[in-house]
Amino acid sequence: MAAPTELTEPSTSTRADPVIAVRELWKVFGARPERVPGDPELTALSRRELMDATGCVAAVCGIDFEVAPGEVFVVMGLSGSGKSTLVRCLTRLVEPTAGEVVFEGEDILAADRRRLRTLRRDKFSMVFQHFGLLPHRRVVDNVAYGLEVRGARRADRVKRATEVIELVGLEGYERSYPDQLSGGMQQRVGLARALAGDPDVLFFDEPFSALDPLIRRDMQNEVIRLHHEVGKTMVFITHDLSEALKLGDRILIMRDGKAVQCGTGAELVGAPADDYVADFVRDVPRADVLTLKWIMRDARPDDQLDGPELAPEVVIHEAVRAVLAADRPVKVVRDGNLLGVVGHEEILTALAGE
């Protein structure tokens, strides 16, 4: 699967001041794990070779990435790739072996227990695959639990819990108990609980993998809607490529604890870094992911350039009707500047998956 020659620009999702900056992050399990990150000979070994040589397992190996404010950053990989260990390292539910996790300018690996409790209580929340609801508490009290831990007055926490219950579509279920709700509704309670404290970042660790496909799709749409409404920065862990492409502004693909490629869905599909990523995205309909900037060509002297205009970010399948209806190339324009053109040949080639 060849990359288009027209596009060499990097993703623009990451900004100058990231909410999260991860640098050379390692998590090694076993005896004397700290020796591994600083030893070039050991870091050069595969996971299997390292285990044979030292008895240690490297779950996260020198990972680097940044998450921009308001971004949905997805980490995906197969079972055993290290993605869940990675997200737990970001909140120090698992203690990293080496590296940095800088949250809003603060290296949280240097935080003491008191500071870490404050960060977990006020700055970030997690939504897990297993909802962890308190069975003896009604929905409103489950949602308000974090606020109760903070010491908020009952009237204030009930008011806030009621607001987020309505936000996630559970209005009318405030007095229900968890066992009276479906799996999807229980997960909405977990999502409401995470939102109630108004955290800066939401971490999702495969929250929908145990749900039925239709409920899972509904919850994915719910996350998208909530992101549009509240604009929270989100780090989302999944093993499902379609889920990653649907939710993620950018996607980090992991394999055996290492980062294989990080980019937008279009960058992964249009320019996979290696055969592993290419296999991952092989069955993805390119026209549903790639945008016009991936298939546009330079204008030719004989092109008539008085036809319709489209933005380079328009997804190919959304542009099909306009391109095929035009009797001349469609101009791809940004800020009044002509970037290229797309005609019948380009759009049909893309639809054919070539």
Image (tube, rainbow, N blue to C red):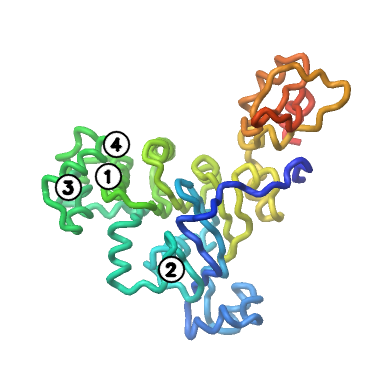
Q: Check contact, mark 1 vs mark 3: CB within 8 A.
A: no
**x then y, percent, for residue 296:** 75, 32
Give residue 312's quadrant in the image: top right
Q: Which mark is residue 212?
A: none
**Residue at figure coordinates x 35%, y 56% from the top left:** 124
Looking at numbered disc 3 in the image, what kind of residue is underneath it? Arg
Element at label 1 = helix
Q: Which of the marked residues, 4 or 1, is nearer the chain's N terminus?
A: 4
**x then y, percent, for residue 285:** 64, 36
Q: Check contact, mark 4 vs mark 2: CB within 8 A.
A: no
Q: Which residue is mark 2?
A: 107
- Measured along the vertical axis of the image, is residue 240 above or below residue 110? above
Q: Which residue is mark 3?
A: 157
**Residue at figure coordinates x 62%, y 48% from the top left:** 11
| 180 and 250: which is toward the camera | 250
Q: Which residue is mark 4?
A: 167
Q: Which of the marked residues, 4 or 3, is nearer the chain's N terminus?
A: 3
Q: Which residue is mark 1?
A: 189
**Residue at figure coordinates x 54%, y 67% from the top left:** 23
Per the model, the C-alpha gap separating discs 4 and 3 is 15 Å
Image quadrant occupied by the N terminus: top right
Q: Which of the marked residues, 4 or 2, is nearer the chain's N terminus?
A: 2
Q: Depth-wise, is mark 4 or mark 2 nearer the camera?
A: 2
**Residue at figure coordinates x 32%, y 46% from the top left:** 191
Looking at numbered disc 4 in the image, what kind of residue is underneath it? Leu
Looking at numbered disc 2 in the image, what kind of residue is underneath it? Asp
Per the model, the C-alpha gap separating discs 2 and 1 is 31 Å
Element at label 2 = strand
Per the model, the C-alpha gap separating discs 3 and 2 is 30 Å
Q: Which of the marked residues, 3 or 2, is nearer the chain's N terminus?
A: 2
Say few, some or many: other residues with alpha carbon within 10 Å of mark 4 (under 14 / 14 to 19 / 20 or more).
some
Per the model, the C-alpha gap separating discs 4 and 1 is 11 Å
